[in-house]
């Protein structure tokens, strides 16, 4: 065998080894799943609204049904929210956000961190989903009516406009 044949065989062996390593690595990789849900919610009790410094703070528990092709995101959604709105109509929203099935089994447990523009809340949910267990990070949009009694909820669905606000700290006493 001549020198060109040896080079050709060496290249073929290197390529097949690299392909095998890449294929083996791909099998071990954990893939992220795209998930989404949508539904409506309403205030379980009358919401409370208090003036606190330059903010109006709305507190309430909102619940309703959501549907999803992913069973971990289908059931009853509950959001216990604290929504602080400044005089200019912008603010922040925080609170726990869960989904349970019809037997009250916990399917998703997250925390909301969001910007508020008018009666629209747009932000991130961070936490866990269960069955199978996985970490969860998703965008959420909640469109409330002006009295904060009814809302449409979308998680990881549709096109969410980017929102950024600069805000003064909301007093902890509120």
Image: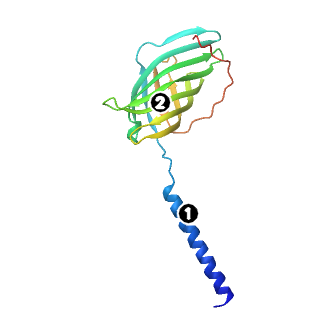
Q: In the rendering, which numbered label is found on residue 22?
A: 1
Between 101 and 12, the one lying in front of the other is 12
Instruction: List x then y, in percent, for residue 37.
Output: 44, 37
Number of numbered callouts drawn? 2
Local crowd at mark 2 within 10 Å, few (<14), some, or many (≥20)? Answer: many
Instruction: List x then y, in percent, for residue 122.
Output: 57, 29
x 44%, y 34%: residue: 38
Residue 27 visible in image = yes
- Say whether marks 2 and 1 touch (CB < 8 Å): no
Instruction: List x then y, in percent, for residue 148.
Output: 49, 18
How much space separates mark 2 and mark 1, taking CA atoms? 41 Å
Which image quarter is the N terminus in? bottom right
Between 101 and 64, the one lying in front of the other is 101
In the structure shown, which secondary structural element does the residue marked by tag 1 occupy? helix
In the visual, does 132 lie left or right of 156? left
In the visual, does 115 lie left or right of 41? right
Q: Which label's residue is closer to the chain start, 2 or 1? A: 1
x 55%, y 25%: residue: 120
Kindly identify which residue carries mark 2. Answer: 153
Q: In the rendering, which numbered label is found on residue 67?
A: none
Residue 124 vs 32, above or below: the answer is above
x 48%, y 25%: residue: 96
Local crowd at mark 1 within 10 Å, few (<14), some, or many (≥20)? Answer: few
Residue 23 vs 168, above or below: the answer is below
Residue 88 vs 22, above or below: the answer is above
Q: Which residue is outermost to the left?
A: 103
């Amino acid at each position: 065998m001549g020198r060109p044949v040896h080079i050709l065989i060496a290249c073929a062996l290197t390529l097949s080894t690299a392909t095998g390593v890449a294929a083996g690595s791909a099998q071990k990789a954990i893939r992220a799943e795209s998930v989404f849900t949508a539904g409506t919610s309403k205030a379980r009790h009358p919401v409370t609204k208090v003036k606190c410094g330059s903010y109006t703070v709305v507190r309430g528990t909102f619940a309703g049904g959501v549907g999803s092709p992913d069973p971990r995101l289908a059931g009853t959604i509950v959001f216990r929210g604290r929504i602080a709105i400044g005089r200019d109509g912008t603010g922040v929203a925080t609170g726990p956000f869960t989904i349970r099935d019809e037997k009250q089994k916990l399917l998703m447990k997250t925390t909301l961190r969001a910007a508020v523009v008018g009666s629209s809340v747009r932000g991130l949910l961070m936490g866990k989903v269960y069955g199978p267990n996985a970490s969860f990070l998703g965008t959420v949009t909640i469109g409330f009516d002006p009295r904060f009694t009814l809302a449409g909820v979308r998680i990881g669905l549709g096109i969410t406009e980017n929102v950024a606000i600069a805000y003064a700290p909301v007093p902890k006493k509120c």
